[in-house]
Amino acid sequence: MMDQNSLLKLNLLDHVAVATRGLHKGEIVFQNEEAITINEDIAVGHKVALVDIAEGMSVYKYGASIGNATQSIPKGAWVHAHNLKTGLSGKLEYQYQQGSKSWTSRSIDHLPTSFEGYVRENGEVGIRNEIWIINTVGCINKTAERLANIANSRFSRDGIDGVYHFAHPYGCSQLGDDLHYTQKLLAGLVRHPNAAGVLVMGLGCENNRIQEFMPFIGEVNEQRVKFLSVQSVEDEVEAGLEALAELVSYASTFVRQPVSVHRLKVGLKCGGSDGFSGITANPLIGEVSDLLVSKGGTTFLTEVPEMFGAETILMNRAKDEVIYRKIVDLIDEFKDYYARHDQVIYENPSPGNKDGGITTLEEKSLGCTQKGGHSSVNDVLAYGELAKEHGLNLVQAPGNDMVSVSALIAAGAHMVLFSTGRGTPLGGAVPTLKISTNSTLSEKKPHWIDFDAGRLLSGMPMEELTEELYKMVLETASGAYRTRNERNEFREIAIFKDGVTL
């Protein structure tokens, strides 16, 4: 019997296929009934040459170039960093392609169109009823931690989902944009509707003192947001617990009620990727993103450096020329950021990505951007900017997992869909739903992984898994499902840094 399932070719134009299992030197496998003799041991998720590839030739995967061969590669050989390099270099000139969008959403009418959420007094909607302690400066991380621990013991059954703090090292000795990044990110957390109440806690002598921070937050409901400068009180724990008691009392007045899915905002992220990320989990997330957008919801795509090499796909989906120009600026400004620091613009993927089978940034980006589905790009958000438009938004942030997850949350994401092929236990300040690209990871790390997209490789239809993940998203939003990061109490933030520390 011919083995037709060991190689996965993604596009008719492709010169490579992905190994769906570990392949051994000398064995014969088939691709479209064509026999291919494997020249060397090749790990699962890695690429196999389907044809003889000449030195300097552009190598295609996903129907697009993922780099250039650095030497002749015979049919049946392993294609990776030893014989393939990026074809990207420098900044590019782009041209607006008006009317290039032709996608129509696939409507699934029988799926639910609402979830059980918390409607806040300002009209915003939350999917959790939590109390957050946001400290303006890292010096009081441990004070915030102590307060959260005591408060969780004292108020655990008082109509809230918990009291949480988010440690960070910043807020003092920062200059210029660095300080503003800190203030924008923390302000986004203060405004976030998953927090029914917020205690903003400052030290009193930092750059980011409460009075300097307040303009970034904007107008607040005094019942929902309390402020405490710990240098100005005799006992900061006593004062903090008094404020938290008032916040818990306020938060307990909210109850879940039916909310249309068009109010839901979902962040899209990948980390610890492998050779299947762009084949299983990321396209699946893209399908769910399109489904949410078709029902009026909002999704956020970030990791700007991991758009390099696939950015024109997003540019061609801009809803108009204004948004197209914003995407161009988003890409170019991040390339300028690399250049200012004398770093190679296309220095990616990470060692773990390479171990998983990803070779070049083009390959990484072509897989990464699939999380955005096929919807038009309706807006581009600066770091720390709150979303204003429904539909797919691009968010300014790097590829770093915690920095980008935090940026998605500051933009307003109620939860984050996070695909991974290598595995990670991390969780953001909101429910972070981990989706494995392969079933082996899901079986190995069930305490990390919420959803197994690797079932696509064993023949489960994309439509069936799309419906299953969409329903899990709404169950998470309704509180019926608690993500692994919530169960593990893994909640973190990280703030983008680009400047001088005093």
Image (cartoon, rainbow, N blue to C red):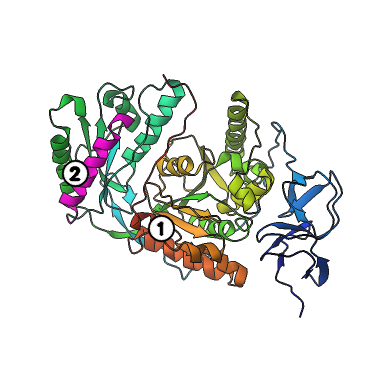
Quadrant for the C terminus in the image: top left
Q: For marks 1 and 2, give the one nearer the viewer.
A: 2
Q: Earlier in the sequence, mark 1 or mark 2?
A: 2
The circle on residue 441 is none
Amino acid type, callout 2: Leu
Quickly name the residue at label 1. Answer: 261
Inspect the magenta stretch and tell me whether residue 397 lies in it: no
**57 to the left or right of 341:** right
Residue 294 vertical position relative to residue 471 in the rendered view, above or below: above
| Separation (CA) of disc 1 from disc 2 | 28 Å
Quadrant for the N terminus in the image: bottom right
Tell me the quarter of the picture where residue 4 sits. bottom right
Q: Position of residue 58 (x, y in %)?
A: 80, 47
Amino acid type, callout 1: Val
Which of 455/426 is in front? 426
The part of the chain drawn in magenta is: 136-157
Residue furthest top in the image: 502
Q: Position of residue 463 (x, y in %)?
A: 56, 68
Tell me the quarter of the picture where residue 482 sits. bottom left
On the question of residue 14 being in view, the answer is no
Inspect the magenta stretch and tell me whether residue 150 lies in it: yes
Q: Circle 1 sits in a helix, a strand or a loop, which is it? A: helix
**144 to the left or right of 354:** left
Quickly name the residue at label 2. Answer: 247
Residue in the image at 61% along x and 27% along y: 336
